[in-house]
Amino acid sequence: RTPQYFVTITKTSTMTEKRQGKKRGVGGAKTTNHGDEKLTKRQRMAMEAKTPYFTPKPSSASSTKRFESPLEQLMPQQRIDLIADLSESILEDPSTAITSSRTEVPSSGGGASRGKEKDQESDTKKEPQYHKTQSKMHKLLDLAVLSNNGHDAHAARLALLSLLAIFSDILPSYRIRLPTEAEMGVRVSKETKATWDYERKLLQAYQRYLQVLERTWEDGKFGLSWAGLDEKKKGNKQQGGGPPTTLAATAILSLSALLQTSYNFNFRTNLLQIVVRQSNHRSSDEVRSSCCNALSVMFTKDLQGDASLEAVRLMAKMIKQQSTNNRISRAIHPDVINTWLSLPLRVHEDEAIAAKLASAAKAKKAKKSDQEKLTLEIEKEMKEGEATVDKLELAKNQADTLHVVTLTYFRILKLVAAVHQEDTVENGQGDKPESKSNTATELLPCALRGLANFSHLIHLDAVVDLLAVLKDLLKHVSSLPPDAAIHCILCAFKTLRGPGRDTLPVDPKEYLIPLYNLLPRLGSSVGSEKTMEAAIQCLDHAFLQRRELSTSRLAAFLKRLTSTSLHCPPHSATPLLARARQVSSRYSSSKVERMLENEEDIVAEGMFAPEAEDPEHSNAHATSLWELALLKYSIHPKVADHSLAMAKGQFLKLPAEAPGKIWASMGRDAREGFIPQKAAWKKH
């Protein structure tokens, strides 16, 4: 019986490790407690679990023949078996699999000439001849190229996915720095030299894999007809062809997966350029969503912030190139800008300025003497070896990222305002949206949503400019789409809650009047599911996070909420009624409670004006909330319960009946077509 095969781990101690402690060789990585650094993740997991990682298959003549035969001469099933064998052997020992080996060529000769050869051997001995054998990694890379594997698309797709799994397993989580010529001339140990060779060959294999992926995507990104064109015709043909081929889609999905796991490794710039460029792909929704999702995941996982800064700059450059002559091209998809919502920006601009001053002082100090400069370089390399987050560097990266993001948002807002002004001049009125304004306002809700998310971090001067731009946009609130208009109001409310809320002389009435006029459009609009959540947040900022002193304005909003709930679907009417209950419970005054009585018992001057634009001029005290009497007979039980509870003056049972939670649950039921059934209990 043969014992089970376990991975053996040998602990190496090199001269460089003794000098630098945790930092090994030139790579700048910290050593682990599990032993050799060349072990893959699966090998370490198998070692910790004490289970066999890999059971080697006995080498048969067929497998040896498949490896030595040309790829064009193999059958499709033989190529698939070869991909499986190569993947297993590479994961078993990556250092050996990426190195090409040499085999001795046997000498050929007949029996008649043996006597002469014996005589010649005594005089001169022939040196043995060697044949260079291709490494297993390069063999697998050849299988991923159509021109090398006999144009087998299925085998190329399997090879690309196998290489993705291999590189995701063996690539380290740090950037490899190859030794310089001066460092190569220094005498080092045998283990250190072997590590240098392994890292150099790993970088070469990874670079070739990225080139194969990029070439595969460029050949088939617009379908088979695009792949058959010449380079000149591809350059002349405009973007907008058919969907990509299966092999090209596999290539771009592999690039997106690599960005999520290996964004700290080498060739990050090449990887980001491809993924950012294809995050705006219009021919395939799957390709665009995968690239945008990869960028969002990278933004969330990036601890140092340098990769996020590089990606944001590339995306901002792409958006700037599409905006020319005060026009935003339709080529930019909103998903590209929505990825910035995943940025974990936490550093205020004042803190960022302090971090920049500290880094500038450190750089100025390094110019004084070569000894201090060398000390700073050693400290930087030691920080990389410790794999810790530098707070000054993080603050600087986040400040630069925030500056690029807010600058792009402001550019979109100003372009939209310019387009609306031109449309108003051309048409003579601004209440009818034209095609130009629709094209310009496609990105407006995304920019407003992002500004509302990061408004508490921007500088006070930028806050003043932002409020001025929002005020100009709200002058044409009737011409804006409901999604853009409600996010414009929400961005203004969140900005007023940020820095300078006590010093800015801003009247909330400028944003309450557009919100009052926008509420009836929420239920009748097609995309009401996009606006209802923002409307609930606007009401929270307007009446719950601040104190409203005007009872006439408060009564007008309560009347408008109940009347809007009549023509809204149940999943939109219920959170509106819940928010109205919350507002009426907080402002429990005699004038508000009088609206729950009969109209015949109400003593008021004048009549109710529902068409008034200003809520204070509507005279809502002259009417009652008669809509609650109709809503309590609604077919949906939750609408009936909330309307009846509001008529009785009952409080909400928080947090179970919070408006945001009600919208999340009922909105999901409406999207999925789920109909809840009420259990009927029978008495026995």
Image: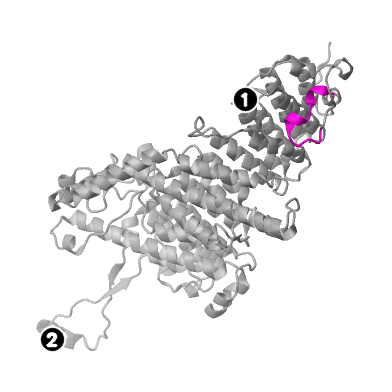
Circles 2 and 1: CB atoms closer than 8 Å: no
Q: Nearer the viewer, residue 71 or 260?
A: 260
Instruction: Identify residue type, mark 1.
Output: Leu
Q: Position of residue 83 (x, y in %)?
A: 47, 62
Residue 625 lies within the magenta run: yes
Residue 154 seen in this snapshot: yes
Residue pointed to by mark 1: 544
Looking at the picture, tell me which residue is in the foreground, 34 or 480: 480
Is 202 on the left or on the right of 337, as rendered?
A: left
Residue marked by disc 2: 119
Quarter-of-image position of residue 47: top left
Amino acid type at circle 2 is: Asp
Residue 223 versus residue 603 in the image, above or below: below
Name the residue at the top extreme: 684
Q: Which residues are magenta?
A: 610-626
Residue 485 is situated, as x and y percent measured from the top left of the image, at 67, 44
> Mostly what secondary structure, the magenta segment?
loop
Instruction: Select label 2 or label 1 by which is in front.
Output: 1
